[in-house]
Amino acid sequence: MSDPARILIVDDDPLIVSATQRLLEKAGYEIFTAATGSEALQAAIQYLPDLILLDINMPDMDGFEACRLLKSDPRLIGIFIVIISSTYTDSESQAHGLDLGADGYIARPVSNRELLARVQAMLRIRKAELEIRRLNAELEARVEERTRELRQAQEKLVRQERLAVLGQLAGSVGHELRNPLAVINNAIYYLKLVLPQADPKIQEYLRTIESEVRTADKIINDLLDFARIKAVEREAIPAAELLRRVLERYPAPQNVRLTLDLPPDLPPLWVDPRQIEQVLGNLVLNAYQAMPEGGELTVSSDQLSVFSEQSPNTEHRTPNTEHRSLTTEHWLLITVRDSGVGIPPENMDKLFEPLFTTKPRGIGLGLAVSKRLTEANGGRIQVQSKPGKGTAFTLVLPAAGKEAK
């Protein structure tokens, strides 16, 4: 059952107020009263009535001014106002009241039956208007939601088209670029052999070329790995072994302090070592790049066991017996945490999107490839970050159990 409509009677004549209040309360409405325009404004804000019956002649301000003030308050804009007067009954006064925002005008004398009918009519109109507003707001919300969905679908389609083109180019371009890079790499190796005591400037240039070749080779690997994820060849391997390989390949810069927190009793991982080594390498490189002025890189690991209840086998269940068993899933968590610049909140949802990058170098495939490789190995990747406080990427990977036996 809905609450009764609220009506505010504004009149300085107590006899009129009393008679009108009895009539409307008998009809089931909740009634409030005010004797002046100022009291009407306060009561309207306090009670938020559905309808105000407003007299014109009042001691502090007339009903026209009270109507104007009520309608100019955004909090009260939805309240219906009916001016009711025995003196200002001419058409000019009625037009003036309606111009000020009144929703109706009643000239006295008026019978109780007519007054009640007019009040009921106004409340019906207000109810219909509120319903229309609600439907409009609901429609606007649906349109906004649908527009957002269409925009997301369009963006997804654009990404898919870009990825399709990327996949077509990746294979041929990647293989073509690897040949000259291999030649350059061999040339650097030869020059180092024949010029062991070369000028420091020459040695610096050789190191720069070697570093750029590694960067180009990584971009090619990312392109190829994203275009086609190779089959996963799992084996049991300690997390410490994988991290040792990664840190040997990507040693920490001199201005970065490295901390390892790897408990000795961790079970081995059950993953493809080459693929997860690539994921960890991406995360470590990202951490170094996030600390251009130096900082601390912490690599830690922990184990997690998840117990789940297995539903009974209904085919072999006896009538009054239900057998349930617990299964245990073992996971290893590897967290790469830096003390760098952090990730802005607006970029968090885009981190793993292909071709998204905020770096001046690179094409934005490292994290996308890392996510695909992690999921291909049955795991997942999580990220937490605060701008200026650093970032932590956590790999949740399956631990070796009965699969490794």
Image (cartoon, helix red, strand yellow):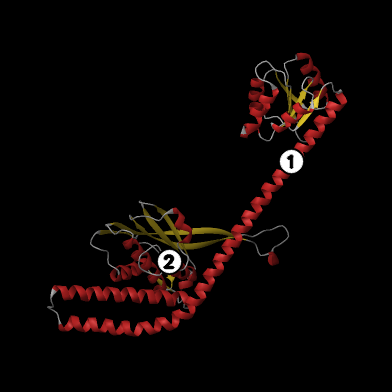
**Displayed quadrant of residue 109:** top right
Q: CA distance from mark 2 to mark 1?
A: 53 Å
Judging by the rendered image, the residue that carries numbered circle 1 is 129
Sequence-earlier tag: 2 or 1: 1
> Is the residue 269 above or below the residue 31 in the image?
below
Residue displayed at 41% across by 60% down: 393
Q: In which quadrant of the rendered view does residue 17 lie?
A: top right
Amino acid bearing label 2:
Leu
Q: Position of residue 269 (x, y in %)?
A: 42, 68
Badge 2 crowding class, 10 Å Cα cut-off, few under 14, some 14 to 19, many 20 or more, is many
Which class describes the residues within 10 Å of circle 1: few (<14), some (14-19), or many (20+)? few
In the rendered view, does 329 fall on the left or right side of 60? Answer: left
Q: Secondary structure at mark 2?
A: helix
The one nearer the camera, 82 or 176, is: 82
Q: Residue at x 29, y 85 (%)?
A: 183
Location of residue 167 in the rendering, given as x and y in whole percent from the top left corner: 48, 77
Q: Position of residue 132 (x, y in %)?
A: 73, 44
- Name the disc covering residue 375, or none: none
Height in image: 30 above or below 266?
above
The residue sitting at the front extreme is 92
Residue occupied by mark 2: 367
Q: Is residue 71 left or right of residue 262?
A: right
Q: Amino acid at mark 1?
A: Glu
- In the depicted structure, whether residue 386 falls above or below residue 370: above
Question: Can you say whether 118 is above or below 172 in the image?
Answer: above
* Secondary element type, mark 1: helix
In the rendered image, which quarter contains the N terminus?
top right
Residue 337 visible in the snapshot? yes
**Residue 51 visible:** no
Name the residue nearer the viewer: 78 or 151. Answer: 78
Residue at the image point whose x is 64% and y is 25% from the top: 41
